[in-house]
Amino acid sequence: EDKVVQSPLSLVVHEGDTVTLNCSYEVTNFRSLLWYKQEKKAPTFLFMLTSSGIEKKSGRLSSILDKKELSSILNITATQTGDSAIYLCAVEPLSGYALNFGKGTSLLVTP
Amino acid sequence: GAGVSQSPSNKVTEKGKDVELRCDPISGHTALYWYRQSLGQGLEFLIYFQGNSAPDKSGLPSDRFSAERTGGSVSTLTIQRTQQEDSAVYLCASSLVGGPTQYFGPGTRLLVL
């Protein structure tokens, strides 16, 4: 079964809109949750979250972890066409090192 | 500095042939991972190398898949007797020992006809 579930699977918005991407996970004990942006092929690192309730921010992107709800959100404000990509959420388990990835949310920002 | 590099970027092969995919990790990163991403799917873990330790091969889908890492740096993923279901993007990542942040290469897109 999927341990990391992302929603929505795909999303189309207009430039300037704000979007919220969701990631929920079944792993109750884990070391960290990571967000990646995948354009074309190589996922690029966005955020690593380890503590609940502490927001990480980078420009128009921000993310927060809610360990009580076993979820994380990724917010993008004032979206631009360059934000079009697949956004991947991954959980690093306590034991082991292989990240458990969700299937991703495919975001398309139209002009 | 240079990121993770992979070659070839694209590979088209016929069913039954063997293929070799190469990954050159970031200098100084002792951990190296291979993942597979099929169309519409998340990344599927294949194999993990850490320094000189025995690799974790638990994610390899069949004995047709193997990987090695020479000198603690470059890694080669080999798929023997390729099947159509092997068609996917094969991604390599590296990280510092104990670090969860994995840095990915551009991947190799494999198409088995």
Image (cartoon, coloured by chain):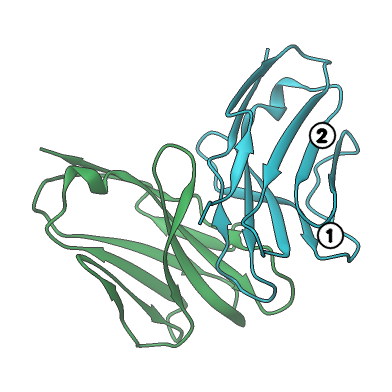
| Residue sitting at x 57%, y 71% | A26
In front of the other: A7 or B46: B46
**Quick one: label 1 or label 2, which is nearer the N terminus?**
1
Query: Residue B61 in the image: x percent, y percent?
Result: 80, 42
Which of the chains bears the disc numbered 1? B
Q: From what the image shows, is residue A42 above or below residue B109?
A: below
Q: From what the image shows, is residue B92 above or below residue B98?
A: above
Query: Residue B82 in the image: x percent, y percent?
Result: 79, 22
- Under circle 1, the secondary element is loop
| Residue sitting at x 65%, y 26% | B87
Query: Residue B73 in the image: x percent, y percent?
Result: 76, 53
Q: Tell me the distance, in whole angstroms, between the alpha carbons under discs 1 and 2.
A: 16 Å
Q: From what the image shows, is residue B64 above or below residue B46?
A: above
**Amino acid at dot 1:** Asp
- Residue A74 picture quarter: bottom left
Q: Color used for chain A? A: green
Q: Color used for chain B? A: cyan
- Residue A57 picture quarter: bottom left
- Under circle 2, the secondary element is strand
Q: Judge left or right: residue B88 versus residue A88.
A: right
| Residue sitting at x 58%, y 49% | B4
**Amino acid at dot 2:** Thr
Q: From what the image shows, is residue A83 above or below residue B11?
A: below
Query: Residue B111 in the image: x percent, y percent?
Result: 63, 21
In front of the other: A109 or B92: B92
> Counting other residues with Cα less than 10 Å from the Cα at mark 1, is it few (<14), some (14-19), or many (20 or more)?
some
> Counting other residues with Cα less than 10 Å from the Cα at mark 2, is it few (<14), some (14-19), or many (20 or more)?
some
Q: Which residue is mark 1?
A: B56
Badge number at residue B78? 2
- Direction front: furthest residue: B1
